[in-house]
Image: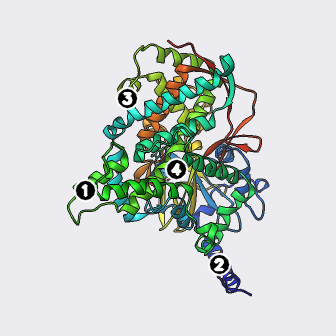
Amino acid sequence: MSLLTTLGGLLLSIQLVVLLFKYIQRRRWDVNKLPSPSSKHASWIWGHELAIFKHEACEMYGSWAALLGSVYRVQAAMFQPDIVVVADNAAASHIFQNPYNYVKAPAFLPIVDKLLGRGIVWAEGDEHKHQRRLLAPAFTINAVKGMADDIFECADKLAGRLRARVSQGGNIQSVLNIVPYTSSCTLDMVGRIAFGHDFGAGESVEAKEIGASWHQDVMLGHSFGGFLAPIIINFLPWIPRLPVKALQTDGVAKQIAKRLAGRILDENRVGSHSQGRDILSLLMEDNRKKATGEAKLTDEQLLDNVSTFIMVGHETTAATVNFTLLQLSRNPEAQRKLRAELNSTKEALDYDSINKLTYLDAVAREGLRLHPAAPRTERVAVRDDVIPLSAPIKTPGGETLTSLPVKAGQVFHIPFTVLNTNYRVWGRDAHMFKPERWLEADGVPQQSELPRGPWVGVSTFCDGPRSCIGWRLGLIELKVLIATLVRNFEFQSTDADIKQFISPTLQPFVGDEGGVMPMRLSLVPEL
Ligand code: HEM
């Protein structure tokens, strides 16, 4: 028997004893009083998690919230303690406002390290505070305004590529999969903005590598293996540390950031790099100005954050654009109104003028509300706490809970999609795409009743000190892309049955194929 097998067996036995001990301890926790969905949706080994995985993004969380209320518990896979699902605004906000008491699952940190590096997404506690403080100046209103020219230019290039594709052979309309187009465009945007690199509209070697590896992730994420992997890692948290090549190889984005942005850092060190307006240049310049001994990001942290921005900054925005276009294709009246607003101004749009367009703003809000690119997140309590609630919970035992006492180690699932579509907050038409709700008096509830986050009214960018640092950038990219595309094309849905799954971010699927959203595009005559 090899040393590795013996070691594995030993670790597994210790793990089982620890789990048994924890199971006995947890039977007395208050969260056990919470309502739980019927066991007909659960299996003895996978708990409710398989049903959640098999259905569309957050579908089961939503159905159970309608039945059981905004806070309930589900059975976890592989005999782990029950998970608390939080779709209550006050409870979610409390968790997000205390990110160092409610952390991301520690078992996944080695994987984030391998895929993206030790940047802001990986960091916890003081290390996170430090990185966030140093990175924040790159995402202020003024900084994002300075990125607008690159964003408009990339969107115009995409419109040009699509025009050429649609009008091939003298046509004026064509059915195409919109996903690779939007995805390569947001990669171009983030490449320029993060480190002044042009990914060449999906044609450069690096863009192809990122695209291929992402497609693999999308297909794996929706397979049974993709369901199993995080469960096994939760159960056996030492697995990512095993000396196995596949587990220890850097992710593609990290390799590319090291290769391309690493060159820039080298040039900067010898003084031959000309400073640009991109985030890496701004941070290098900031580092240069600082006195010796003052807090700075190391070269390693700069590179790890470039790879982080590349990965978390491009597919999220592309997914939001895709699903907002899908909604517009299914709501021709909303699309017509938006085009009329866009055409009411004859001049080319810029950062200030695009932000004055009220119908576009309402369309962006509905796209973000109904289709959060990261539909849910997960947190683990590191200490005992009492969580406040927006509304009391009636337990199946007849007790009324006005707050929820939790113990260290409790796992939470927080589905942004359900926070954004809770009919108790948004009303009976909560699931409808209705931009007008943001423009009519009393169209949406008071701000105090809405989910909290950096962009008022939607939870899509999370909340608190770990909310999306790039939300202003994501939002302006979304608005510019929707405006440019709707000015140039009419979007019509096809009869393809498009489903949305979490894989690893929100992805359109047709049958078993991920990253597919067929759409009919017709040229709008140039003004
Ligand atoms: C519509 C587009 C976007 C959406 C919906 C979105 C959503 C989110 C969400 C939900 C989180 C919190 C995840 C969690 O803690 O579980 C997050 C974090 C983050 N986002 Fe975004 N994001 C978008 C665009 C961007 C862009 C364009 C960038 C930057 C280039 C970016 C950079 C980040 C970073 C660095 C974090 C981690 C922040 C921290 O831990 O302090 N995001 N985003």
Q: Position of residue 429 (x, y in %)?
A: 61, 29
Q: Which residue is mark 2?
A: 15
Q: Secondary structure at mark 2?
A: helix
Residue 210 lies left or right of residue 126; in this view the side is: right
User: Which quarter of the picture shows residue 118?
Assistant: bottom left
- Give the number of callouts: 4
Q: Earlier in the sequence, mark 1 or mark 3?
A: 1
Q: CA distance from mark 2 to mark 4?
A: 33 Å
Three-letter code for the amino acid on which mark 2 is drawn? Gln
Looking at the image, is mark 2 or mark 1 nearer the viewer? 1
Whether disc 1's CB lies below 8 Å from ligand 1 is answered no
Q: Which residue is mark 4?
A: 311
Three-letter code for the amino acid on which mark 3 is drawn? Tyr
Q: CA distance from mark 3 to mark 2?
A: 55 Å
Q: CA distance from mark 4 to mark 3?
A: 24 Å
Query: Which of the labelled discs sits on residue 288, or is there none?
Result: 1
Q: Secondary structure at mark 1?
A: helix
Three-letter code for the amino acid on which mark 1 is drawn? Arg
Task: Please indicate, yes or no, whether residue 443 appears anywhere in the rendered image.
Answer: no
Q: Which residue is mark 3?
A: 351
Q: Nearer the viewer, residue 114 or 156?
A: 156
Badge 1 density bin: few <14, some 14–19, many ≥20, Cα 10 Å: few
Q: Are marks 3 and 2 in contact (CB under 8 Å)?
A: no
Looking at the image, is mark 4 or mark 1 nearer the viewer? 1
Q: Earlier in the sequence, mark 2 or mark 4?
A: 2
